[in-house]
Image (cartoon, helix red, strand yellow):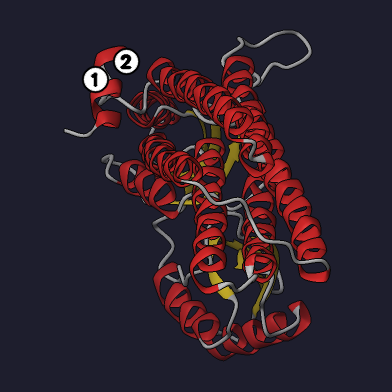
Amino acid sequence: MGMGDFLFKKFIKDHENVKDVKVRDSYGKLAGIVGIISNGLLCIMKIMIGLISGSIAIVADGINNLADASSSVITLAGFRLASMPEDEEHPYGHARMEYLAGTAVSIVIILVGAELGKSSLEKILDPAPLDFSPAVVIVLLIAIAVKIWQALFNINAGKKINSLALIATGTDSRNDVIATSVVLAGILIGHFFDLQIDGYLGMAVALFILWSGICLVKETVSPLLGEAPDPELVKEIEDMASSFDGVLGTHDLVVHNYGPGKIFASIHIEVDSKVDVMISHDLVDNIEKKLSKDLNILLTAHMDPVNTQDPNREPLKDIISDTLFKIDGVFGFHDLRIIPGNTHTNVVLDVVIGSDCSSSKADIANALSEAVHGFNATFECVPEFDTSYVRNIKA
């Protein structure tokens, strides 16, 4: 058992139940407190050793640990704010504050990378030998060891609870490991080989830190913009809903993520139109309750009656499926309704397309009309078009 797992077990009640909102919140708070304490101790140690040895580099690195501690403060504050209950102005809660905390840490990483790039450029233009002493080397080695542990601790916690904020904090610590290692390498190379390459090494690290910060901003902002839901969650919802007796199919699944533990979803449930409406309504209610409890989401299910007695239904389904399967970017169809009239029969359906669909809606409609006319000349196809909000695979 590593130190991180020991801390999780020691300070987090029911630490393995990571889907519980309270347990998840405890992970975030523990990570924030550990970061503040460890970075604070590093800061004090480096500044004291730096002042005693006369090394400005170590003093500056100690001040940098204050910025690292601020990242932990941001993480801790983010989890505290995210755990606030719903109120009148925010009926969906405050869980997205965790994403904002992750974005803030990512911006701090970018600023650190920019500052390192600036100082590295100055060293390239005006190289100067770095301070060398056993104290400097020992302090930097200790700092590297602590930062490696911090990175592993935060990334491990972040993966356990699927927290971008903690992963961002862990990435920040990993970047510090690289930056401090480069400083140490520059000192050793400069001392033993009389080569002043510290500026060039620092610039390479600065570019890497900038790149990782930009990637983290993208990752932490994405859920705020509204990204596609986890495919595993989508599959669980569809499979569990379809497993109930009396369900003929599902469609129009929409998932809204308002932060960890705050997932709202809606789905349409197809049922036989010949079954008593009260029985079907009870079925849909049971689906809502079961999925909401088991998946820790708030599900709203809509009942769609389907006429299974029409002899034309199954042949038309096969013809329409074959036609749509040939078109890239079309994921399927649903709500097939056959409506007879005096002179012709309308075949109404909803076609599900993706943003990368290779054909226009008019072309898809024409292809469907030709296929339906081939089945029966008196049948008119009336397609409506839906957008897939959950996945990009053929239905």
Q: What amino acid type is highlighted by mark number 1?
A: Lys
How crowded pointer 1 is (Cα within 10 Å; few <14, some 14-19, many 20+) is rated as: few
Q: Which residue is mark 2?
A: 12
Which of the 4 image quarters holds residue 224? Answer: top right
- Quadrant assignment for the N terminus: top left
- Which residue: 61% across, 9% down? 85
Q: Which mark is residue 22?
A: none
Q: Position of residue 355 (x, y in %)?
A: 69, 70
Q: Quadrant of the C terminus?
A: bottom left
Q: Secondary structure at mark 1?
A: helix
Circle 2 packing at 10 Å, graded few (<14), some (14-19), many (20+), is some
- Name the amino acid type tagged 2: Ile
Please state the horizontal and vertical placement of residue 106, each as a whole percent of the image: 67, 45
Q: In the image shown, does 9 or 181 lie closer to the viewer?
A: 181
Give the CA distance from mark 1 to mark 2: 6 Å
Residue found 36% across the figure and 26% down from its top: 286
Is residue 139 something one can see in this rendering?
A: yes
How far from the left and from the top, in percent, is residue 366?
71, 86
Q: Nearer the viewer, residue 223 or 219?
A: 219
Q: Provide the residue designation for mark 1.
A: 9
Task: Please give the name of the residue rendered at 81% of the width and 58% of the height, measured from the top-left corner.
Answer: 118
Do residues under tags 1 and 2 come within 8 Å of each other at their CB atoms?
A: yes
Give the camera-side residue of 256 and 41: 41
Residue at figure coordinates x 75%, y 66% from the top left: 127
